[in-house]
Amino acid sequence: MVPTRGESAVADRVQFTEGRVKAFKRPSKSYVIHWDAKTPGLGLRVTANGARSYVFEKRVHRRTVRTTIGDPSSWKLDDARKEARRLTTVVDRGVDPRLEAAEKTARAEAQRVEASRRDLVVEGVWQAYIEARKEHWGARHLANHIALAHAGGERWRRGGKGKLTKAGPLASLMGLKLSELTSERIAAWLKRETARRPTSTGQAYRALRAFIAWTADVPEYKGLVPSDACSARAVRDVVPRAKTKDGDCLQREQLPAWFAAVRKLSNPVIRAYLQTLLLTGARREELATLRRDDVDFKWNSITIRDKVEGTRTIPLTPYVASLLSALPSKNEWMFASTSAKDGRLTEPRIAHNAALQRGGLPHITLHGLRRSFGTLAEWIEMPTGIVAQIQGHKPSAIAEKHYRRRPLDLLRMWHEKLEAWILEQGGVQFSPPKSPGRLAANAHDSVQAS
């Protein structure tokens, strides 16, 4: 803006030279502008504190506009005159040079931001993805995403005898730029990783595909990953197919050996956890995060934090009630652990694998126990809808989804029937109390009697 009267002084026009520009004295006013007689519109502003700068001034649309060219220490006189002549042509076109400069600055800033966006590395965005989505995930799902991209090379926290952790399937992609996640690169990654570990690579690919879809919805990352990164035929042809684990399920004739081995485990918490996992068909993390307040011994029900529905309520069957009521009350968790950081059971696999080996049984995962619940239910012809509601599976038909929400008592009738049959086949002697209200009080004695 042009200053008001009294704030500045305007000197006579004089032909500038490098020497004269340096020799102009400080004014008594706030500043003074000396005008170049050779180049119309070019001036030198000198302030009271000695600061100097070339300026350009001219009228545009009946208004006087002034813009700064630069410091004489950075601008030679000839260059300043050339810039003044260029600005004159801009003004002659009816353009305010200040707006032109602002637009130029905005374009430069946009280019800088875009260049910075294109330099974004997968690892940093992957962490942002986890942070943005973790409140919608369960603990196990979150841990899987962290493990898939883990760089490896760390010593095992427990066991392992000095072994180092292996890098996750996605680790080799973490150092790339988002724009480098092309279909060709992903296809090559899939081929390389599938040859080593097909199952975890398939899981990693599905996680990567969800991650890429998320970036397309976030303005900061939108458009950086090629649109065909996961949809190109070159990628689809090499994606490892998900396969059901053959044999990852307890057979009826294996139940006696399994119960005998598990019930001999020295840790009562793991012992109860594994049996409850089989007899409820719950997911491993759903059961591991069960709180004492989630179990209602009076009305014989368990409220489970379901990853699909949020929560679901299932029957507390007699034998499971006896297991849970006998557990020591150490903290808020039903399956408490004083040695674990979270205060609850976190890794029962080692004990389970040892029990399987001791019982001469094939390897069965913890998820295989959940699978066993649904498979064994067919022996008593338990309706599939009831199995799904107890296990927390999504309804598989319109009628199941919208019209079938069975009451707890109906679930209990079938659930207790299945529990009794599994215990009978497993050779477990158990006599449930006749009065449900006395179940919690008598549970511990019932276990001892068995």
Image (spheres, helix red, strand yellow):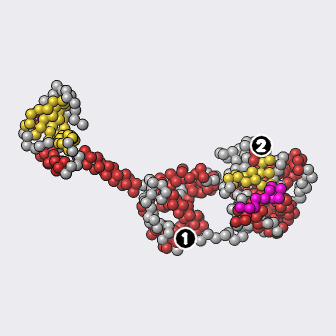
Which quadrant is the C terminus positioned in? bottom right
Q: Identify the residue at horizontal 81%, vertical 58% (top origin).
A: 411
Mark 1 is surrounded, within 10 Å at the Cα level, by few (under 14), some (14 to 19) or many (20 or more) other residues, namely some
- Secondary structure that dominates the magenta span: helix
What residue range appears in magenta?
402-411
The amino acid on which the numbered mark 2 sits, given as a three-letter code, is: Ser
The x, y position of residue 303, in whole percent, is: 75, 51
The residue identified by callout 1 is 239
User: Alpha carbon of mark 2 to alpha carbon of mark 1: how far?
Assistant: 47 Å
Would residue 192 be visible to someone looking at this image? no
The x, y position of residue 227, in whole percent, is: 45, 65
The x, y position of residue 333, in whole percent, is: 72, 46
Q: Nearer the viewer, residue 206 or 347?
A: 206
Q: Nearer the viewer, residue 105 or 146?
A: 105
Q: Identify the residue at horizontal 89%, vertical 58% (top origin).
A: 429
Task: Tell me: residue 203, above or below residue 5.
Answer: below
> Magenta stretch containing residue 181, yes or no?
no
> Magenta stretch containing residue 403, yes or no?
yes
The residue identified by callout 2 is 329
Q: Quadrant of residue 255?
A: bottom right
The amino acid on which the numbered mark 1 sits, given as a three-letter code, is: Val
Tag 2 secondary structure? loop
